[in-house]
Image (spheres, coloured by chain):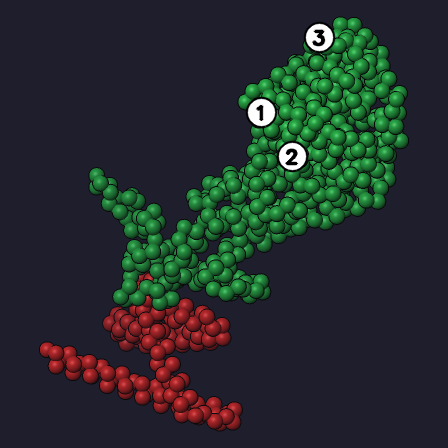
Chain colours: A red, B green
């Protein structure tokens, strides 16, 4: 039992480490791009610090999103929750709202296309399936 | 009597009285000597009770002192004789000595027949002094010796005429003719044969003494009819305007000290608007500005108490206000203020040589003279047209004083609301905030309840007050817990930061409520907020925090308690 728990923990820990490594790699790539843009060098410690902060903030975001969804008596995290999370930063909020609208439009278009197709083919079953797909995507 | 230790010992009460008089005498030395004829005249109508009730009048010590001071000050203004003779009368404040003086100096007059001299005259004179103040009476006993009691008779009836119009001109005519003056005082319950006879007896000595000392003859100030109705109306308006904030405020704050904290503001502002003529307000305001903070507190409870008591009735009010103002003035000896007051008071009266002399004397002495007749006249003149009188050129010093006190008044107006708010806020917070999150959730609501009534606080910062009062409280807490002294700018910055912080919190709460599709902020929103702040975690739940930090009264609001009898409170 304890060994299992320990193994589990180790698994989680290794999983976590891998996630951290992935974040670190992504942050490094982004910093390289910025460095090329602004002609500024990034030290490795800086990149490491940025990646650590990003990882912790992601944890916080996840918890907050879950809280917001639960506050709205939902079991799924919504774009509304994300917008509420990003409200502090005005520019970020704007960006997210725009992206959200884009995605919504895109989804609507897709819906319309798929509805037409389903009308041509199997009306009931395909509509339900695609409606479910669209909802899950949303 | 002639000596320093002339004490008359009729009994224990008498001893106390003696001690009192001597005390008052010692404190009143510079003011005593020239007895105020007018003042004594006022109280003459209460002659019967005077000496007989001296022990009872002892209770009216504060009034005694102040009115005595007023009188003596006024008297001093009349002539310099008083000052010179003051030292001589330092220790002769016993009734016995005074009586002896009167006997020595007052000419004999008869009670029964007008213009006849009677030996018991001085005795009734002794009895005459008002029951209100024994020392005042004792002071009055000195009047005949020093001053021609020319104005004695007019002054006699003035207090009795609080309810009536003061017609000095008629009175003076009667005086000259030797008519019984008590006939004019209809409402005077104390008017009696004795009073009339006393008036008569005073009438006779008047003329010879006035002839002897024409320079000192003081023409009594002409008084306008006291428009009591208008005065009361003003008072009611101001009191009504100020009453609602009181009641609303007291309702919303369970822990505050509403009366103590609020009454000073109400009553500080009450006298100011009630006297449209700025003099009284300036006087009161400048007085307060000069007094220290604790003194302010000490004075205000006494003053509002007196004011409240007097509000119900015309007479009581008319009586009390000058008394309170005079008591306040008596306590504060500020020469410029008194000069201004004296100058203003004198401006009101008709011009005459004696008046100009009085003005000079007033300024020279620098003594505040708030007397009943003047208070009445000022009250009436505050309401009535003052243009004719104010066109008289005030002399330089008196003109400067009002302006300086006017400048001070706005300062005080702003300081009093802040002072009151500080007092009130201290009583509000039941417990020091251990955690910031627990604090915002509760104080936010009482703060919002508090702010609307406070918005009516008069003063230049009235609009800022509702927002800054709570913040100033927090800033004070901050400075208390910071173990170092803080600069004002630092405290202001702290206030700004707190302001932004609370605004942010409220915005978050609003967003949380909207996120849940609601328009009302509910405890769930607050719990979410606290969770975001990190106060409520998976290990520490809200209930735990509530139980840790809140007193039972608040706790049972959030966590229902089951009482005996199995009734759950609050019922939901």
Instruction: Determine whether the residue tagged by mark 2 lies in a helix, strand or loop.
Output: helix
List x then y, in percent, for residue A28: 39, 90
Using the rendered view, name the quadrant where residue B277 is placed: top right
Q: Mark 3 or mark 2: which comes first in sequence?
A: 3
| Discs 2 and 1 lie in a common subunit | yes
Q: Which residue is drawn at 86% across and 17% down?
A: B208
Mark 2 burial class by Cα count in 10 Å: few <14, some 14-19, many 20+: many
List x then y, in percent, for residue A129: 26, 73
- Cα separation, mark 2 vs mark 1, equals 25 Å
Mark 2 = which residue?
B327
B509 relative to A8 in the view: left or right: right
Closest to the camera, between mark 2 and mark 1, is: 1
Mark 1 = which residue?
B15
Q: Which residue is drawn at 67% across and 20% down?
A: B96
The disc label shown at residue B193, or none? 3
Q: Which residue is drawn at 53% across and 61% down?
A: B495
Q: Which residue is drawn at 71% across and 34% down?
A: B29
List x then y, in percent, for residue B4: 68, 29
Chain ID of residue with mark 3 = B
* Vertical order, B117 against B455 (above or below): above
Residue A48 or residue B416, whichever sits in front? B416
């Amino acid at each position: 039992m304890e060994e299992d728990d320990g193994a589990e923990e180790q698994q989680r820990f290794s999983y976590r480490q891998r996630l951290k490594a992935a974040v670190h790699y992504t942050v490094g790539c982004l910093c390289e791009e910025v460095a090329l843009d602004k002609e500024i060098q990034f030290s490795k410690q800086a990149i490491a610090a940025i990646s650590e902060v990003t990882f912790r903030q992601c944890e916080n975001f996840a918890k907050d999103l879950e809280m917001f969804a639960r506050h709205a008596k939902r079991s799924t995290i919504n774009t509304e929750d994300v917008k509420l999370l990003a409200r502090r930063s005005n520019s970020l909020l704007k960006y997210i709202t725009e992206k959200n609208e884009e995605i919504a439009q895109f989804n609507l278009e897709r819906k319309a296309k798929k509805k037409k197709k389903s009308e041509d083919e199997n009306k009931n079953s395909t509509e339900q399936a695609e409606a479910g797909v669209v909802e899950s995507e949303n | 009597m002639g000596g320093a230790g002339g004490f008359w010992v009729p009994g224990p009460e008498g001893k106390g009285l003696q001690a009192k008089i001597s005390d008052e005498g010692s404190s009143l030395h510079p003011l005593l000597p020239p007895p105020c004829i007018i003042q004594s005249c006022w109280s003459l109508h209460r002659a019967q009770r005077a000496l007989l009730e001296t022990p009872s009048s002892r209770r009216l010590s504060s009034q005694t002192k102040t009115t005595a001071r007023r009188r003596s000050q006024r008297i001093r203004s009349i002539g310099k004789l008083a000052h010179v003779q003051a030292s001589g009368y330092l220790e002769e404040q016993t009734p016995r000595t005074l009586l002896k003086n009167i006997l020595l100096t007052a000419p004999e007059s008869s009670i029964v027949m007008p213009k006849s001299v009677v030996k018991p005259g001085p005795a009734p004179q002794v009895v005459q002094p008002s029951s209100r103040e024994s020392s005042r009476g004792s002071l009055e006993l000195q009047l005949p010796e020093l001053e021609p009691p020319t104005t004695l008779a007019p002054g006699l009836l003035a207090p009795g005429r609080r309810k009536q119009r003061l017609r000095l001109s008629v009175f003076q005519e009667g005086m000259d003719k030797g008519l019984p003056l008590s006939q004019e005082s209809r409402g005077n319950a104390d008017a009696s044969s004795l009073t009339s006879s006393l008036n008569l007896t005073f009438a006779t000595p008047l003329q010879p003494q006035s002839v002897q000392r024409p320079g000192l003859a003081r023409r009594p100030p002409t008084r306008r009819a006291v428009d009591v109705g208008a005065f009361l109306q003003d008072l009611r308006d101001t009191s009504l305007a100020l009453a609602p904030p009181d009641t609303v405020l007291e309702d919303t704050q369970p822990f505050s000290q509403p009366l103590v904290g609020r009454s000073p503001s109400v009553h500080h502002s009450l006298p100011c608007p009630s006297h449209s003529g700025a003099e009284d307000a300036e006087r009161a305001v400048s007085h307060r500005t000069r007094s220290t903070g604790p003194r302010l507190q000490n004075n205000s409870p006494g003053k509002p108490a007196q004011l409240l008591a007097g509000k119900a009735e015309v007479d009581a009010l008319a009586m009390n206000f000058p008394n309170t103002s005079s008591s306040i003035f008596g306590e504060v000896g500020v020469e410029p203020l008194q000069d201004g007051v004296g100058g203003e008071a004198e401006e009101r009266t008709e011009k005459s040589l004696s008046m100009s002399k009085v003005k000079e004397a007033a300024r020279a002495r620098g003594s505040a003279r708030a007397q009943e007749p003047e208070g009445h006249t000022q009250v009436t003149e505050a309401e009535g047209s003052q243009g004719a009188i104010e066109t008289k050129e005030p002399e330089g010093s008196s003109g400067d004083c009002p302006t300086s006190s006017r400048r001070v008044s706005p300062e005080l107006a702003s300081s009093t609301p802040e002072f009151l708010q500080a007092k009130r806020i201290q009583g509000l917070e039941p417990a020091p905030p251990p955690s910031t999150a627990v604090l915002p959730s509760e104080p936010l609501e009482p703060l919002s309840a508090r702010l609307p009534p406070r918005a009516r606080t008069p003063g230049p910062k009235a609009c800022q007050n509702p927002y800054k009062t709570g913040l100033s409280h927090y800033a004070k807490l901050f400075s208390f817990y910071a173990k170092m002294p803080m600069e004002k700018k630092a405290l202001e910055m702290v206030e700004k930061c707190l302001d932004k912080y609370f605004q942010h919190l409220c915005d978050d709460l609003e967003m949380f409520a909207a996120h849940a599709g609601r328009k009302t902020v509910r405890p769930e929103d607050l719990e979410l907020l606290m969770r975001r702040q990190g106060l409520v975690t998976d290990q520490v739940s809200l209930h735990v925090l509530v139980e840790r930090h809140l007193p039972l009264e608040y706790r049972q609001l959030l966590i229902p308690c089951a009482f005996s009898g199995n009734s759950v409170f609050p019922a939901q």
